Image: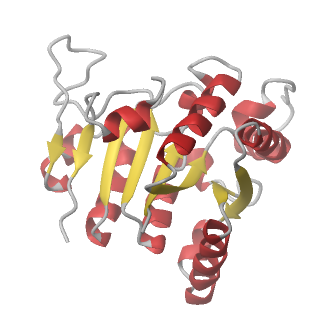
Amino acid sequence: MKKTIVLKIGSSTLTGKTKIISRGKIEDLARQIIALQKDFQFIIVSSGAIATARQFIDIQVGNDIAIKQALAAIGQPALMKIYQEGFADFGLKTAQCLLHYRDFENEKSKQNIVNAVNILLQNDFIPIINENDTVSTAEIRFGDNDKLSAQVAALMKVDLLILASDINGLYDKDPNKHSDAEIIPLVNEVATVKHLGGASSSDLGTGGMETKLLAAEICEQAGIEMWILNGGQSNFVVEALEGKVDFTRFKRTV
């Protein structure tokens, strides 16, 4: 039986820290899914709608959050088209799922999510999930989908959550300020590293280590393993599974 991985892709990973969505990164994701499809099935939680819109439009009239909501509405279908076209080149089928945090507070809604995602997986579609930023500001303000991906992982009872970021993992101190910072390869309890959470984020993303540790807490409570690794590298999932790159693993405790 295949194992299920929730793979969260942040804006900085999708753009390669530029201002343009990288079709090469989309192809890299597709190639990895093909390489791993014998043993794994994937649910993707993708940021990047706002970054996609900013490639071809500039909205300046309105308050900051409202502008970002508008950009999300413009960019979301364009982002899905990029995924659909890029994955189709490899024979992979995609489906869009827009969720809201309130969906995880209602039992009926939660069951509907589980049913829909399972049907998609059973029919060889890759669910690509994002928060509905047009009606919600939570992801825009706080998380770049880190928390959402953890909630999806917990709800679907998956085997692993991977947060693909622009950093190699969790460090014992800020690597941008300390040249001797070392990556922490294994975390047994999130409480022991909570003090390492920071609010830093990229220009195109909103998530920092603080939100990733919040995601780790959700996974810890649900008994799900979580990894933080550098999504900017090619073949990053395959190489992490093969133990060829350094990353941080939050051990499953239940």
The image shows residue 105, relative to residue 167, as above or below, that is below
The image shows residue 131, relative to residue 242, as above or below, that is below
Q: Is 158 situated left or right of 80 in this image?
A: left
Specify the quadrant of the image occupied by residue 16. Answer: top right
Q: Residue at x 63, y 82 (%)?
A: 109
* Colouring method of the image: secondary structure
In which quadrant will I find the C terminus? bottom left
The image shows residue 218, relative to residue 56, as above or below, that is below
How far from the left and from the top, in percent, is residue 48?
A: 66, 38
Q: Residue at x 25, y 35 (%)?
A: 243
Instruction: Please tell me which residue lies in front, 39 or 167.
Output: 39
Instruction: Please tell me which residue lies in front, 114 or 243.
Output: 243
The image shows residue 75, relative to residue 135, as above or below, that is above
Q: Residue placed farthest to the front in the image?
A: 38
Q: Residue placed farthest to the top in the image?
A: 179
In which quadrant will I find the N terminus? bottom left
Q: Is 175 situated left or right of 109 in this image?
A: left
Tell me if residue 21 can be seen: no
How far from the left and from the top, in percent, is residue 247?
A: 27, 34
Q: Is 206 situated left or right of 93 in this image?
A: left
Q: Residue at x 37, y 27 (%)?
A: 167
How far from the left and from the top, in percent, is residue 73?
A: 82, 48
